[in-house]
Amino acid sequence: LEIEPEVVMGWDIKSCFWLLMMNPFSPWVFINGSIRHGVRKNNLQHRFRTLIARLSPYVIANTKAGLEVNLMKPGKTRKVIYNAIDSLPKDEVNIKVNRSKLIAEAFREQDSSFKGPVLLSVANLFVIKDYPTVIRALAEVDFDFRYLIVGEGSERNKIESLIRELELGDKIALLGRRSDINRLISIADIFINSSKGEGCSNAILEALTHGKFVLASRVG
C-alpha cells in the first residue's frame, strides 16, 4: 500500500533538516516540531536547531517560551500547542496509608504521623534544576515540613553538603531514582519545580494530573 501523506512532521533536528531540504520538491506540508523545551544554549546543536526552525514553513512548539528562545513569536505559521493533562481519580485511603509509609521510610519511624505539609520535587540533581535556591529558602520558613527530592545527578554531594550546613537533614530527604513517582506525587501537598530553564516540564504535568499545587520558578 503506497502512502501519500498530506502532512509530514519532524521531531528532531536531523529529521527536520532533511525534511526542510526535501520540502520544495514535495507535495506534502512540512511541520517542524523540534522545539520541545524553553532552553537554548549557545552551542552548535541549539543554534542549528534555531536556524532550521526559522527556515521551516511551519513550526509547532509546546510553549511560548520555546518559540521565544529560538527567536520566533506565535503567529499564523508559528503555533503553540500546550501539552494536555487528564486528571487522575483520588484514592484518599491509599494516599493516607502511603503518606505514613513513605514519610517513615524517608525520615524516621516516628515521622509516620507527621501532619504538616509534604513538599516534593522530581528532577535530576543538575545545576539547571537549582535545588540550592529551594533549600536555602526552606531554611528561612517558620513552619515544620518534609521535603522529598526524587532524582540523581552530579550535584548530589553539593546538595547533601548544603542540607548538612543548614541543619535540615531531619526535614529534607534525597530519595534518588524511583519507579513509584505517581505514588510519591499523590502524597505531596505542594510540588516544587525550581529549574533555571524549562519549556513544558513533564514533572509539572504529572503533578497537575494529581491536582497538586505547583510552585515553580518564573522562567521559560
Image: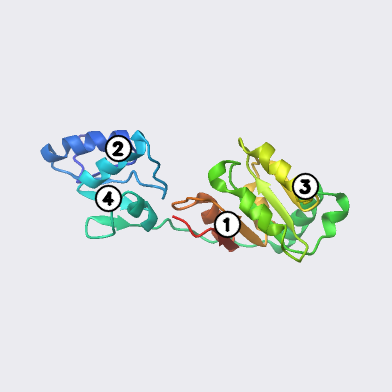
Query: How far separated are the C-alphas under marks 1 and 3?
Result: 20 Å
- The answer to whether residue 63 shows anywhere in this view is no
- Say which element carries label 1: helix
Q: Is residue 217 above or below residue 108?
A: below
Q: Residue at x 67, y 54 (%)?
A: 136
Mark 3: amino acid: Ala
Which residue matches tag 2? Answer: 48
- Say which element carries label 2: helix
Which residue matches tag 1? Answer: 207
Q: How many marks?
A: 4
Which residue matches tag 4? Answer: 59
Query: How far separated are the C-alphas under marks 1 and 4?
Result: 28 Å
- Say which element carries label 3: helix
Q: Nearer the viewer, mark 1 or mark 2?
A: 2
Among the two numbered marks 1 and 4 on one chain, the one whose residue lies closer to the N terminus: 4
Residue 106 image label: 3
Among the two numbered marks 2 and 4 on one chain, the one whose residue lies closer to the N terminus: 2
Query: How far separated are the C-alphas under marks 3 and 2?
Result: 44 Å
Among the two numbered marks 1 and 3 on one chain, the one whose residue lies closer to the N terminus: 3
Q: Is residue 30 above or below residue 18?
A: below
Q: Quadrant of the C terminus?
A: bottom left
Query: How far separated are the C-alphas under marks 3 and 4?
Result: 44 Å
Left or right: 37, with 140 as reference point: left
Among the two numbered marks 3 and 2 on one chain, the one whose residue lies closer to the N terminus: 2
Mark 4 crowd level (few <14, some 14–19, many ≥20, 10 Å Cα): many
Mark 4: amino acid: Val
Asked whether disc 3 touches disc 2, contact meaning CB atoms under 8 Å apart, the reply is no
146 and 100: which is toward the camera:
146
Mark 1: amino acid: Ala
Q: Nearer the viewer, mark 1 or mark 4?
A: 4
